[in-house]
Image (tube, helix red, strand yellow):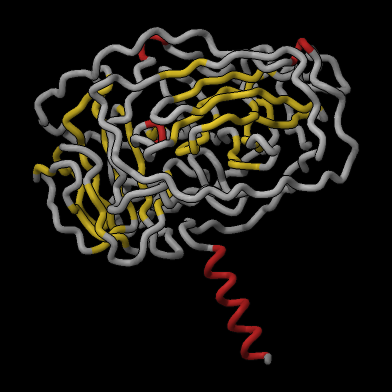
Amino acid sequence: MKTTLTTLLTLLLFVTSLTACQSPQPVIAELPPLPTRLPTLASPATVTVVSPPAETAVLPLLPPTYTPIAAATPTKPAPAPLSESAAARALAAIPTPAPVHTPLPATPLPDTIDRTCPETSPLKPTYARYFLSPAIWPTPDVQKSEPHFWLSKPLPGSGRFLINENYPYGWDMNGRLLLHNAVDFAGGLGTAVLAAADGAVVVAQSDMNAWYGWRCNWYGHLVVIEHDQRWFGQPIYTLYGHVLNINVEPGQRVQRGEQVAEVGIGGAATAPHLHFEVRIGQNAFTATRNPMLWIAPGEGRGVLAGRLLDPNGRPWHGVVLHLLDEKGQIAATTWSYLDDPLHYINPDEGLAENFLFSDVLAGEYRLYTELQGVIYQLPVTVAAGEIVVVEIITEPLRSRRTEAETPTPTPEAD
């Protein structure tokens, strides 16, 4: 019996660590429970739907069977209905997307970044959840609002993306891990890793003695491709981390869907998976964007991008958000982006989002979150192959002191 129990505990620990990257000390914060009865939104709002250009290819993926998770039972009385002053409102209308940019000649840019490993590894910062930033969040750039589902899934197969939904871009898995500037695709050891678009290989090696990530030996082995396409003149890079059996070399041309390596384990990985980054402007750890705004969603699925701000335009970090289906059950969960001293979590220039629901089955939902005892909810329609853009403006930060006495917000635990 003792041997069996030990074996089960070991297996549970392994499954919990799947697709995650290592971190020193776990810090687990409780999420606010959902009430069983949800109040009606005081001022119904609208949303903006962004469709990709007609020539943007959407991968022929089959929609999977979808089973929502039951809503949690509340442990405290439901908050008062949302006041009109704090109602969610829509993002300003985004103009009709421009045609996809013509690819530029694929001439990889020279690497001007110092890759020398530092003498000491950096320390993991402490991230504040349910925290109102003192800095103003970027505003959407309507000149760069063009959708860009230019990349293909970097692993073979059709159907819904198999990613670690508990560790999305901009989240630290409740303090367990480093702030994530990528998405982790689940794949067995040896699964083919595919180029997400045409381009030229600029890195294909171990990073034991080269600084490409948060520290040296962060990826174990990695491949980086600079793609032919440019985003308003900026180069686009995709990074494939924790790979093995690399079969390309720097300077080599690759085509979309061509195998470049295999899913492996190394560096900060605790189990086989593909760490996938999109870097814009330069091949730097601080230059990432949310990859799920660049990969075409699966067939019958769309994307919901949003902004969670206070009335002064300051972002709320690390706040849980839910998508509720027509039965009021949780269909998807995400968290607003966290921040750290290096600011390596970046919004899309056109959307200026600070949370994202990716690869969502098309349908009717309610966006739901709770802050400072106030419930915010917004009806949204997710359309296949499109991006729905929403914005929620919350009540001001509540404080015992006046704003003049406390110009810098402090962490707000719910």
Give the vertical position of 342 relative to 186 (above or below): above
On the image, which quarter does residue 46 sit in? top right
Please provide percent x and percent y for residue 31.
Answer: 73, 44
Q: Quadrant of the C terminus?
A: top right
Q: Residue at x 29, y 47 (%)?
A: 154
- On screen, residue 352 versus residue 87, left or right, reads left
Please provide percent x and percent y for residue 272.
Answer: 39, 63
The one of 152 and 211 positioned closer to us in this rendering: 152
Q: Residue at x 16, y 30 (%)?
A: 228
Please provide percent x and percent y for residue 329.
Answer: 68, 42
Q: How many marks?
A: 0
Q: Is residue 318 visible?
A: no
Q: Residue at x 40, y 7 (%)?
A: 95
Please provide percent x and percent y for residue 16.
Answer: 56, 63
On the image, which quarter does residue 392 sit in? top right
Q: Residue at x 34, y 17 (%)?
A: 146
The one of 406 and 146 positioned closer to us in this rendering: 146
Q: Quadrant of the N terminus?
A: bottom right
- On screen, residue 367 versus residue 222, left or right, reads right
